[in-house]
Structures are given as C-alpha cells and as structure tokens.
Amino acid sequence: MVRGKTFSKISRLISVAVKTGGGPDPDTNHKLRMAIDAARAVNMPKSNIDKILSKAESTEKYEEVVYEGFGPSGIAVMVEATTDNRNRTAQEIKSLFERGGGQLAGPGAVSYNFKSKGMLLIKKESNPEEQMLKIIDMGVEELEESDEGIEAYVKPDLLGRVRENLKKEGFNIIKTELIQKPINLKIITQEDMARKALSFLNMLDEHDDVQNIYTNVNIVDDILDNIAS
C-alpha cells in the first residue's frame, strides 16, 4: 500500500515535470531528471517510468500548488502539492492544518522565512572532512554533515551543473532536489509539543496530493531520541 502510494505521487511528479520543466527529455529538462531520479530511488520499474513519460503530454491536467501556514507551536510550514482539482485540495489541506492544531495562511505568510536552494546529498567516505574541502571549491554555497551523508546547497540554477561536476570528480550523489530551506528555525524542547508537530507533519505527508513539506521546526536531539525509543 505504501509502495503504491509512493509510486502514485512520483508518477504525478514526472507528469508535471514534463509539462512545466521543458518536455520529455531528461537531458534538457533538469526538473524531469530529478523526478526520474526520485523514481529510481524507490525502485520504480523502468517500464513504469517510460509509460508515464509516453502519456505525460495527454494525461490529466495536474498543476503545482504551494500552501503556506502555521502548525502547532507556531512552526512555519510550506506544502508543495500536485492536483487536478485546486479547490478540493485547498479545502482538504486547510482541514488538515486545523485538525493538527494549526492554521492555513495566505501566500507570503511564511515563505519569507525560506530560501530556494538546490540540494545534493553526497555519500560520505572514510574522510568526510577532506571530502567537504573538495566539494566547497565546486560552486557550493553551504555544506552540512548529517547521518545520511553530506548535504551540499547551491543556487537553484546551478544545481545541474554542480551535479555533473561532482559526478565527474567521482562523488557518489545519493539525491538531488530543489528545496525550500528555512532561514530561522523554531526550536522545540518539550516532548509533547514535538510529538504534536511530528504528528501534524506526518498527517500532511499522507495526503495523496502532497509532494513535499518544508518546515522550520528544529526538535532537540534528546527529545527526538525519546520519541524514537
């Protein structure tokens, strides 16, 4: 069930990328290339991808919509969705915000606290410090080390170029995507508030139309460990 839902979301993502990113060729449509990379990351069969591409020009008129609002504890949230019925999706997202203890807001309400970035997740090697020194010289604005790997942030229009340069230098790129990176974080130090925030974000993520969720929530490690245990 979860796998099918993931495939459905990515199918929409590919279809929208073909229509809004510049056609069905991933070599010239970077948005489509990222969507196909996302499909491969979840092991979507090539035959499925090819079928979506062949039908993308004539399928339902999906469009991209961004919703902004506040979740529990006043966390800022941006929701990217693809929909074939803007009014239905807006009403359902509004209801989810209210059920989660938040409030849907208008355009610009929280987006000022986010900055568009290209993000590349790079596999860590035995010496991540040395890796990071090499990466920073390749047009990268910011680097962060995480449990998943090294996160490199670049200007959105440089994402494709930096990706290709990193690959030529032998770096293993796990994921490439365009994101909204929060500027100021909302730190949560109470477990009950953290649980409410995570429950709300998970509820949004389960909606069929939702593709990406960005938030400025920052839950301290001790609380996250308690919740995970």
Image (tube, grey):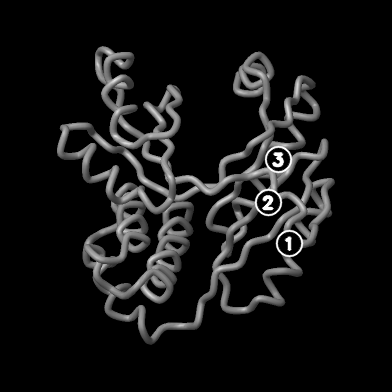
Mark nearer the N terminus (2 vs 3) = 2
Alpha carbon separation for disc pair 1 and 3: 24 Å
Residue lying at the far bottom of the rendered structure: 58
Q: Residue 1 placed where, x, y %? A: 47, 55
Residue 166: which quarter of the image? top left
Q: Residue at x 40, y 72 (%)?
A: 15
Look at the picture and state if 217 lies above or below 99. above
Q: Residue at x 68, y 60 (%)?
A: 67
Residue 218: which quarter of the image? top right
Q: Residue at x 68, y 25 (%)?
A: 219
Q: Amino acid at mark 1?
A: Pro
Q: Residue 175 placed where, x, y %? A: 35, 42
User: Which residue has dot 3 on it?
Assistant: 199
SS at badge 2? helix
Q: Are marks 1 and 2 in contact (CB under 8 Å)?
A: yes
Mark in front: 2 vs 3: 2
Q: Residue 152 placed where, x, y %? A: 39, 33
Q: Are marks 1 and 3 in contact (CB under 8 Å)?
A: no
SS at badge 3? helix
Q: Amino acid at mark 2?
A: Ser
Residue 36: which quarter of the image? bottom left
SS at badge 1? loop
User: Which residue has dot 2 on it?
Assistant: 111
Q: Amino acid at mark 3?
A: Ser
Horizontal arrangement in the rendering, residue 17 relative to residue 204 (left or right): left
User: Which residue has dot 1 on it?
Assistant: 107
Mark nearer the N terminus (1 vs 3) = 1
